[in-house]
Image: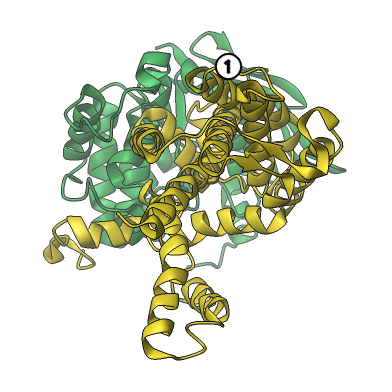
Chain colours: A yellow, B green
Amino acid sequence: MSAYMTGLIIILCLNIIIAYSVFLPAAAGQLNLGAAGFMIIGAYTDAYLSSADEGLGLPILLTIPIAALFTGLVGFLMSFPILRTKGVYMILATFAFAEIVAGIVLNMEIVGGASGFPVTTHAELELLLPITVGVIVFGFYLISTRFGLSMRSIHDDENVSLLFGVNTHLVKVGAFTIGAFLGGLAGALYGHQFDYIEVQNWGILFSIYVLLYVLIGGTQTPWGPLVGAMFFTFIPEILRALGDATGIELLGELRFAAFGVIIVGMMVLRPEGIMTRTFLELLFRKPMPKSDVGLG
Amino acid sequence: MSNVLNFTSVDKSFGGLKVIDNVSFNVKKDSRTALIGPNGAGKTTIFNLLSGIYEVDKGSIILDKNDITNIPARKRINMGMSRSFQNIRLMPHLSTLENVMLGQHHLANSTKENFFPLGLIKRNKWAARAEQALIDAGLETYPGQVVSELPYGIQKRIEVVRALVSNPKLLLLDEPAAGLNSTETKELQTLLENVSTSGTTLLVVEHDMNFVRNLCQHVVVLNFGKKIFEGTPDDVAKDPQVLEAYLGGTDDNAP
């Protein structure tokens, strides 16, 4: 495999994990613009614990789970104030959370502050790929459970879910916490791929992109974040390749402008995302019997 | 026969407006009772008080000998009460089967059940029960269908099935026949008669008086938040106060 392809797959894997991190609360109707915050906590916790030079030098098979669990714990504690907000206010609250995390880490000299932090243990794709597959399988599993059913019910109608006995607050806290865990996992894995982390990697633009993966992919099914992350990882590269082949500047140099147009187009044409329930039905199921419909 | 519901001396105000004024009525076990009245009489408010969406200001609600007046909305389904809604409140992005399985939620509320992959291992007892409930209601054609794509009449019946699979002692139906054509209304009536025969008590808010007469043995009439009459469907039609509420006063010259 060429270095280019390997690099692309690494980015894809990280994008998929962080997409599931934002997807889980989104499937329960909670929009999270704080992906960057979880990524930073996971990346720095893992880097500090695993780095031989400036950190504790622990083995990464220990530090990656610890970093993810710690991020999950932070997510759990933050979910209580954040889940008091709804809709656009929740977007602002999660964004503010990410900014606070960035601000704190930027001023922590123990992890290098603004100059970043080196990660001394490199991990190959052999570690990242199975974890990514595991996250995808976990996403599909969780959505298929009654807990997942509760999440999707809350997404559609929180009050009615409550009347049917769903502990809506607990389910929302759970989805947010598991999402934070996955965000921390993505952050921890990032460091071991790129060997160097800095807070500037994870600004507001990063969080917006991740939220877009999920919204463009679709929040109704666990296919959404997978397709959304692939869409966002591959389309700019495909545009670049097309631009190189054809010499059209709009596809090459200006590919992000073209990409922006594609995103706007997607939002107009498929406002509920690419992978909706009805679209999946179209792909996998037989059409419903016409004779029973609308004649009664 | 014992009562499954005692709704006693209940008051409810919104700001300065008293929408339920000292209303009392009982629902007998295994009966089919209708709650009727003109628009704004307080019928849906009573349903919202029963299901815990609103808290009562005064009075008490006893469900099958348990005082549920101060039980939070989420726990009332455990006490044996579930409901349908005036405007369809199915989960639009879930399939028919998933909507019905939501109705079973409180029966399956353990950690083990919550994390069993229902959607991946499709042969499981909850899916089997939900499918059986759909078959009993004549809706077996639609289990995998996303509900928002189904016709209105079908959605109305799915809502009844969703409430039913929670095994309620008392089933509250808020205008179940509204917007249905005559065939659909008949199908609904058959469904509700079967539900009633199998031992579920029905309390129905309904405007369609033919439907009420065909289905219910007992009628409670409300107007402006007060109970104005209680009796059999035939008596209701003769009561002067009820006629006044609906028609604006008795008129000897009326046809």
Which image quadrant: the N terminus of chain B?
top left
User: In this view of the protein, which residue sits in the foreground, A296 or B234?
Assistant: A296
Q: Which residue is mark 1?
A: A58
Q: Chain of mark 1?
A: A
User: In this view of the protein, which residue sits in the foreground, A278 or B98?
Assistant: A278
SS type, badge 1: loop
- From the viewer's perspective, is B2 left or right of B101? right
Asked if residue B92 shows in the view, the reply is: no
The amino acid pointed to by label 1 is Leu
Q: How many marks?
A: 1
Residue furthest top as drawn: B65
Asked if residue A199 shows in the view, the reply is: yes
User: Percent from the top left, x then y, of residue A259?
Assistant: 51, 75
Figure check: B182 above or below B22:
below
Figure check: B224 above or below A143:
below
Which residue shows up at 84% across the image and 32% down it? A108
User: Percent from the top left, x then y, of residue B35?
Assistant: 51, 39
- From the viewer's perspective, is B74 left or right of A96? left
Which residue shows up at 57% across the image and 33% down it? A188
